[in-house]
Image (spheres, helix red, strand yellow):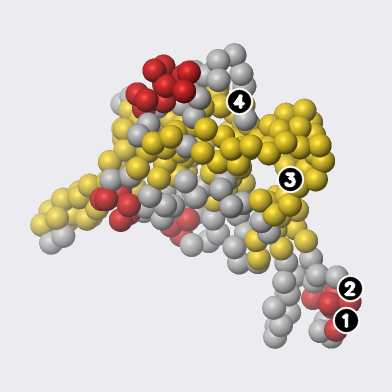
Amino acid sequence: MEYLVKIIEPTDLWYLQNNINKETNKYYHPTKNIPFVQQLEIKLNNSGVIIQKGALYYCIGQLDYGTYKTDSRLKDLWVSLTTETEYNAPIYRGTGTINLEPRQKGSFLYYTDIELSENEQWEFDDRVFQFCSDRVVLGTKRLKLRQMLGDNDGIWRLALKALPNQECKVVLGTNSPAKVINLNKDQTLIADYDLVKGFTEGITEDYRKLGHFGKGGGEGYVWIYEGQGRLLVCENEGLRLG
């Protein structure tokens, strides 16, 4: 499974009709908005992919469509112990290309891919998840009300883990560049905004008040992460730099 992020610009006719010099004003014009579109293309070669619900734009090739459902044979081993709700989503298998819904300028995403293994379980915000290999187990966790108030990415978390003896990939989309960092047992991560978009099993997450305003210099509600594992973080999101 491979993917390509395409940036599609207007046609030469559009530039001509709007009286814009393409060579000098391709990316910016002082008075007119030049529309660019971002589209993600997934290429399959005798493989499969699970995509975010409602994300399909069109697909072509020798592809079979189905609906992913949590594998009941693995419930006792993993799903029922760690997730609250089964997950279902579109799944495509075969050879061909799948194009996801285009995004207009101003709504572009930064894409990050993470290799999954059977030894590491990840949790991601629902809106961050874009697609993943089909050889995985997925489940969902509903956020607590307090967490929903501080989270910008939906009310669910997706839990993912590769099937035994399989190496898989998951692709995430965020509003600002993301990276994976390590958290050690003797460390604690505290953030005053929705910094973390995903984390591995072994890390605990809490959204609670740190002190009180006006008493002891309290920060109000903050995100707190403890334990040992890896996190997917977006440092620039709080700065609104994109």
Q: Is residue 87 above or below residue 12?
A: above
> Quick one: SS at disc 1?
helix
Q: Secondary structure at mark 4?
A: loop
Give me the C-alpha separation between circle 1 and circle 3. 32 Å
Front residue of 199 and 235: 199
Count neighbours of disc 2 (C-alpha within 10 A) and say few if under 14, some if 14 to 19, many if 20 or more.
Answer: few
Q: Looking at the image, which is closer to me, 38 or 96? A: 96
Distance between the Cα atoms at labels 4 and 1? 48 Å
Secondary structure at badge 2 equals: helix
Task: Tell me the mark number nearer the camera, choosing from 1 and 3.
Answer: 3
Q: Is residue 8 left or right of residue 234?
A: right
Which quarter of the rendering shows the N terminus?
top right
Give the label on residue 98, or none.
3
Mark 1 — residue? 16
The residue at 85%/74% (across/down) is 22
Disc 4 designates what residue?
135
- Can residue 221 be seen here? yes
Instruction: Point out residue 103 in the picture as x, y percentages from the top left corner.
Output: 65, 61
Residue 181 in view (yes/no): no
Per the rendering, the mark at residue 12 is 2
The span from disc 2 to disc 3 (Cα, nearest Å) is 26 Å
- Residue contact at pointers 2 and 3, CB within 8 angstroms: no
The type of residue carrying mark 2 is Asp
Q: CA distance from mark 3 to mark 4?
A: 18 Å
